[in-house]
C-alpha cells in the first residue's frame, strides 16, 4: 500500500505525506497552461494542490464555474489519481454573485428548511451593511458555505481552505455555526467524496472546542523581518506562534497539529510606494512594498531559487510540525508595470511563456524532503522553552529558565542585533543541563555571538568552557561558508560548554 493511500480516514502520517508534497496552486482549475502545469506537478511530485478552485469575486456564473473546475479535476486526476485538490470558501461575499445564484433544493433540505424558489440574499449574509464580510452566525451565510462546499466535493475536491475564519466567525465565538457547516460537509464527504474524507484548514493557529480541533491542520502565511545591510529587497522569515493541539478530527490527541505555511497574496506590488517611498519606508511596508508572492516574483531567478531553499530549511528547523506549500501558481495583481499577472513555477517555454523557471529548484528540494533538516530542528512546542524549576542533580543549583543567544547574527533570523533579552533567539532547555537553538543563516559570512543566561548581560558566556563575563563585548564568532546554512548551538550551563553544528 502506498504512502498516500486513504479511504474514509487519514492517519497523521498520511496527512503529513500530502503536506510534505504541497503546492499553492491558486485557480489552477482555470489555468490556460494546464497541460504544462500537470507536467510540472508530476515532475516535482506534488500531491496536494492548495487553492486549486474557488472564487473571491466571481467572473462567471456558478454553473459555468463548477463545470470548468470539474473538468480540470478530472484531467489532473487522470494524470495522478492520488492528488488531493483543495477548494476555497473565503471571507468575502458579493451582491452580484449571490443575487444571480439560485439556492438548490438540496441546501434547504440539508438544513431541514422548506424549499424556496429564490437566490441567495447578500443582505442576509454580511456582517455590516455596505460591506462584503460574511457573518457565519447568520443562517444565509451557512447556506452559502454549505452550497459551495457540497458542489466542490461533487467536482472531485477533497480539501477546503476556509480563509480568515476568525473574521467571519467574530460573532460565532463558540464556533458552533462554522462547526456545524464543517461537520455537515464532513458527513457529506464520508458518503460522496472521492475517498470518503474531506480535509479543512483555515488561517488560524488553533480552533479547539471541547478539546476537539475544528480543523485537520492549521495554516498561515509567513512573517518577515527586513534586512537593510544587503543590496536589494532582502528579508528573513520570523517564527510566529505555533500550531495548537487537541483531539484531531481523526479522534487522536495531538500536542500540536500539522501546520502549513505559504507565500500569500493580497494585492500585489504597491507601484506608487516603490516610486515615492524611501528604502527604509519600503522595507517595513508589507514585504518591501508588496504582498509575499509579488515580492518573491520580483526577485531575480537565482535569488528566488535561494529563497525556496531557505524557506524549506527554515520551516524544517523552526517548526518540526510544519510544511511549506510551494508556489506553483499564485496571483500577482498589477505587480509589473500595471499588468495583471500570475506567478507560475513552470520553466519558461512555448507551453508556458509566463513561467518564472523555478520548477527544477522546487523538484530538487521536494525530492530531498524535510527529514534531513529536521535532525537539527528546535522542539515542537515553540512556546514552551522548558527549564522551569530544574535543578542540577550534582550541585542542586537551579538552572536558568531563560537563556538567550545574541550577537550580530540576530537580524538574519528576525531579531534585533545584540539583544540579550530576545524571545526570537531564546534557547530551549533540552535536558541534561543543556540549552539549544537552531536557525538558518541566509548569507555566507562571519557572525559573532554570546550566550546570555537569565536574559541579562550581567552573566554571559561566549567561549567553549569559558568564564562568565559581564557587558556587551567579548563575543565569539562562527563562519558560515554557504548561503542558507542551518546552525545549531548547544550550551551546557554548569560547564559553559558550547557546541556548534552546521548543515547545508
Image (cartoon, rainbow, N blue to C red):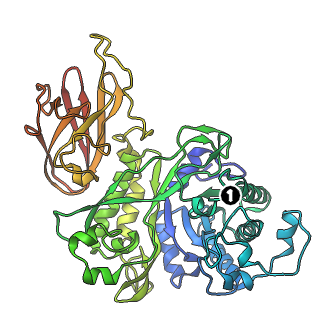
Q: Is residue 302 visible?
A: no
Along the line of sight, the residue nearer the viewer: 48 or 65: 65
Q: Residue 65 appears at what percent x and percent y?
A: 67, 82
Q: Residue furthest front?
A: 129
Asked where in the image residue 465 lies, by quadrant, the reply is top left
Count all numbered tags in the image, as a single digit. Answer: 1
Residue denoted by label 1? 198
Along the line of sight, the residue nearer the viewer: 99 or 498: 99
Q: Residue at x 60, y 81 (%)?
A: 57
Q: Is residue 114 visible?
A: yes
Position of residue 390 relative to residue 130, above or below, is above
Q: Residue at x 20, y 57 (%)?
A: 443
Q: Residue furthest right?
A: 114
Asked where in the image residue 195 lies, by quadrant, the reply is bottom right
Q: 319 left or right of 309?
A: right
Asked where in the image residue 204 lies, by quadrant, the reply is bottom right
Q: Residue 52 appears at what percent x and percent y?
A: 57, 71
Q: Residue 427 appears at what percent x and percent y?
A: 30, 36
Along the line of sight, the residue nearer the viewer: 157 or 351: 157
Along the line of sight, the residue nearer the viewer: 492 or 112: 112
Q: Residue furthest left?
A: 474
Q: Residue 44 appears at what percent x and percent y?
A: 45, 65
Task: Give the SS element for disc 1.
Answer: loop
Please tell me how crowded label 1 is: few (under 14), some (14-19), or many (20+) other residues with Cα within 10 Å: many
Q: Residue at x 33, y 40 (%)?
A: 376
Position of residue 143 relative to residue 490, above or below, is below
Amino acid at each position: 500500500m502506498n504512502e498516500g493511500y486513504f479511504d474514509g480516514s487519514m492517519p497523521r502520517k498520511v496527512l503529513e505525506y500530502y503536506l510534505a508534497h504541497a503546492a499553492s496552486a491558486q485557480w489552477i482549475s482555470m489555468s490556460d497552461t494546464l497541460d504544462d502545469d500537470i507536467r510540472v506537478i508530476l515532475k516535482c511530485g506534488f500531491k496536494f494542490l492548495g487553492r486549486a478552485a474557488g472564487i473571491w469575486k466571481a467572473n462567471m456564473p456558478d454553473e459555468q464555474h463548477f463545470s470548468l473546475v470539474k473538468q480540470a479535476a478530472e484531467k489532473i486526476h487522470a494524470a495522478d489519481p492520488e492528488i488531493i485538490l483543495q477548494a476555497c470558501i473565503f471571507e468575502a461575499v458579493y451582491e452580484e454573485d449571490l443575487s444571480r445564484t439560485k439556492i438548490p433544493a438540496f441546501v434547504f433540505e440539508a438544513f431541514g428548511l422548506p424549499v424556496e424558489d429564490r437566490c441567495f440574499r447578500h443582505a442576509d449574509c454580511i456582517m455590516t451593511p455596505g460591506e462584503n464580510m460574511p457573518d457565519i452566525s447568520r443562517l444565509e451565510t451557512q447556506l452559502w458555505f454549505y452550497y459551495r462546499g457540497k458542489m466542490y466535493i461533487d467536482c472531485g475536491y477533497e480539501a477546503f481552505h476556509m480563509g480568515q475564519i476568525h473574521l467571519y466567525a467574530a460573532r460565532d465565538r463558540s464556533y458552533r455555526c462554522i462547526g456545524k457547516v464543517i461537520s455537515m460537509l464532513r458527513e457529506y464527504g464520508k458518503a460522496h467524496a472521492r475517498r470518503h474524507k474531506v480535509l479543512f484548514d483555515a488561517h488560524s493557529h488553533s480552533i479547539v472546542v471541547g478539546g476537539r480541533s475544528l480543523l485537520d491542520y492549521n495554516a498561515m502565511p509567513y512573517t518577515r523581518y527586513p534586512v537593510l545591510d544587503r543590496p536589494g529587497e532582502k528579508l528573513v522569515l520570523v517564527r510566529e506562534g505555533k500550531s495548537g493541539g487537541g483531539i484531531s478530527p481523526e479522534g487522536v490527541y495531538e500536542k500540536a497539529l500539522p501546520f502549513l505555511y505559504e507565500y500569500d497574496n493580497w494585492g500585489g506590488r504597491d507601484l506608487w510606494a516603490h516610486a515615492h517611498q524611501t528604502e527604509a519606508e519600503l522595507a517595513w511596508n508589507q514585504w518591501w512594498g508588496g504582498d509575499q508572492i509579488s515580492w518573491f516574483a520580483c526577485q531575480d531567478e537565482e535569488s528566488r531559487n535561494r529563497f525556496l531553499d531557505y524557506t524549506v530549511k527554515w520551516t524544517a528547523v523552526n517548526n518540526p510540525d510544519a510544511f511549506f506549500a510551494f508556489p506553483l501558481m499564485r496571483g500577482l495583481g498589477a505587480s509589473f508595470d500595471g499588468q495583471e499577472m500570475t506567478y507560475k513555477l513552470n520553466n519558461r517555454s512555448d507551453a508556458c511563456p509566463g513561467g518564472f523557471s523555478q520548477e527544477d529548484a522546487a523538484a530538487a528540494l521536494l525530492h530531498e524532503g524535510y527529514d534531513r533538516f529536521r535532525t537539527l530542528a528546535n522542539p515542537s512546542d515553540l512556546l514552551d522553552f522548558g527549564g522551569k524549576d530544574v535543578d542540577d542533580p550534582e550541585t542542586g543549583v537551579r538552572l536558568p529558565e531563560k537563556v538567550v543567544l545574541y550577537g550580530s547574527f540576530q537580524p538574519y533570523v528576525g531579531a534585533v542585533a545584540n539583544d540579550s533579552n530576545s524571545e526570537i533567539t531564546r534557547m530551549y532547555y533540552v535536558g541534561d543541563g543543556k540549552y539549544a537553538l537552531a536557525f538558518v543563516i541566509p548569507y555566507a559570512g562571519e557572525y559573532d555571538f554570546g550566550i546570555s543566561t537569565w536574559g541579562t548581560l550581567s552573566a554571559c558566556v561566549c567561549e567553549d568552557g569559558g568564564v562568565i563575563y559581564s557587558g556587551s563585548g567579548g563575543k565569539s564568532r562562527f563562519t558560515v561558508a554557504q548561503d542558507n546554512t542551518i546552525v545549531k548551538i548547544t550550551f551546557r550551563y554548569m560547564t559553559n560548554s558550547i557546541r556548534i553544528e552546521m548543515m547545508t
